[in-house]
Amino acid sequence: MATRPLPVAEPAFDLGARMPTLQLVWLNLYWFANSVHWGALLSIVIPSQVDKLFGNKEVNFPLVVVGGTLAAVIVHPLAGALSDRTVARLGRRRPWLLWGTLPNLAGLGLLAIAPSVGLMALAYLVVQIANNAANSPWGAIIADPVPRGQRGAASGWCGLLNVLGTVVGALIAGLILNKESPLGVYRGQLLAIYGLIAVVQLAAVLLTVRLVPEAPLREARPFTRRDLPRTYWISPAAGRDFFWVCLTRLLMQLGIFGIFFYLQYYFEDVLGLPGERTVGVYFLPIVMLAASLTVYVAGALSDRHGRKPLVYLSGGLMSVVCLAFILIQRPLAVPICALFFGIGYGAYTSVDWALACDVLPDDEEYGRDMGIWATVGILPQVLGIVFGGLTLSLFRGFPNNLGYTLLFCLTLVYFVLGTVLVRQVKGAR
C-alpha cells in the first residue's frame, strides 16, 4: 500500500443523498461470505475436528482457538486504524480486504490437513490474523459513506447477510461432517468443507472490490507511536456514549459466546443428540432463519423510532430463552428456544451496528473506532472458550449436568446487564 499522496478524487458516494438499496447490498456482500466462514468453522468444523482427531475436547479445543482469538483482539483495531491512513488507488478499505484474504485462504488449507493440535492452533492463528486484517477496515464502510438516516437500513442488510451466511455455513458443515464416519472418509469431508469456505470467501471479496467504489484518501497521515495506545482504548471522557456502547456489546457477546462454542457438546452430553447435525442442520438454521425475519425490519424501524427500545426488547427475549434452557433440558426445547432466540438475536444484531455508528467519537477515525467495537465482540470469544472449558472440566461428573447449568446461568447474567446498561447511551434514541 502506497504512502504518497494521491490526486484528490471525486467522492465515491454522494453523502447527502439516499443510497440505492442495491448499493447497500453490495456494501454488505462481504459479510455473507465471512459469516459462512465463521458460521461453519466455529459452530461445527473446529469443535468436531478437535474431538474426532485429537479427543480431550474440553482441553484441546481451547488450545486450538485461544491463541488465534487473542491475536484477533490485537489485529482488529490496529488494522482499522492503519486503514484510516491508507493511501492507495483502491481507497482506504478495499486494499486491506483484498490482501488480507489471500493468507486467510492459505490458513484454511493448513487447517484442513493439520496433523496435530499444535499445527492446528498455528493454522487458526494465521486465519484469525489475516481475516481480521481484512474485515476490520471493511467494518467502517457503513460509517464512511452511508447517510445517518440510512444507517439502520444499512445495518439491517449487514445483519441479514450475516444471518444468511451463518445459516449456509452451519448447514453445509452439518450436512457434510459426520464424526461417526471412518477416519479416511472424515478427512475427505474436512477437505470438502474447507474448500467450499475458501471458494465462497474469495468470490465475495473479488465481487466486493469490483462493485463497491471507494475514493482514495486525500493525503497520507502518519501513524506514530503516540497513536498506538489510542488504537486500543476509548476514553470515557472523550467518547462517553461510544464507551457505553462497547461495554454493553461486550456483555451481550459474553452471553452469546459463553455457551456457543460448547453447544455441540451440550447436545451430545446432556440431550443425547448428534452434535454436528443438531447444531448445523436444526438449531443454528432455526436461529438464523428466525433472525432473518427481524434483522432487516429492526434496522429500518430503528431509523424511525430509535435504537434503544429494540435493544431492550431483543435483550429481554434472549434472556428469557436462556432461562428456559436452564429450566428445560429436554430435546423438545431445542427448536422452540432456537426460534425465539433467533427473533431476539436478529433484532439485536441489526440495531447494535447502527447504534455504534451513531455515536462514533471521531469522523476521521472510523476504522479505528469500529475496530475497537469489533474487538469487544471478539474478546468474549476468548473468555467464553476459557470459562466454558474450565467450568466443564471442573464440574465433569457432577449430577444434573451442573457444568452446563452454570454456563447458562452466567449467560443469563450477561444478557440482563448488557440490556439494562444501554440506557447509559445518551447520544442515541
Image (tube, grey):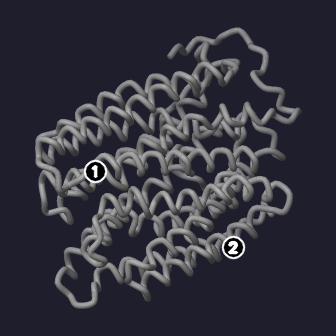
Q: Measuring from the top left, give residue 265's x and y in whole percent.
A: 28, 67
Q: Residue at x 58, y 11 (%)?
A: 4
Residue furthest to the top: 7
Q: For marks 2 and 1, give the CA distance.
A: 33 Å
Asked which secondary structure carries label 2, the reply is helix
* Amino acid type assigned to the residue bearing label 2 in the image: Leu
- The amino acid on which the numbered mark 1 sits, given as a three-letter code, is Ile
Question: What residue would you read off at disc 2?
Answer: 313
Q: Please name the residue shown 51% across and 62% down the image.
A: 286
Please name the residue that numbered disc 1 is placed on.
46
Q: Nearer the viewer, residue 115 or 167?
A: 167
Residue 4 in view, yes or no: yes
**Residue 332 sits in quarter:** bottom left
Q: Quadrant of residue 426?
A: bottom right
Q: Residues within 10 Å of mark 2 (few under 14, many from 20)?
A: some
Quadrant where the image shows the C terminus: bottom right
Q: Nearer the viewer, residue 145 or 23?
A: 23
Q: Is residue 284 left or right of residue 140?
A: left
Q: Secondary structure at mark 1?
A: helix
Coordinates of residue 393 in the picture (x, y in percent) = 20, 74
- Residue at image x 18%, y 57%? 51
Asked if residue 284 lies left or right of residue 300, the reply is left
| Count of labels in the image | 2
357 up-or-down from 304: above or below = above
Query: Disc 2 or 1, which lies upstream in sequence?
Result: 1
> Residue 143 got which mark?
none
The answer to which image quadrant residue 341 occupies is bottom right
- 14 left or right, relative to 73: right
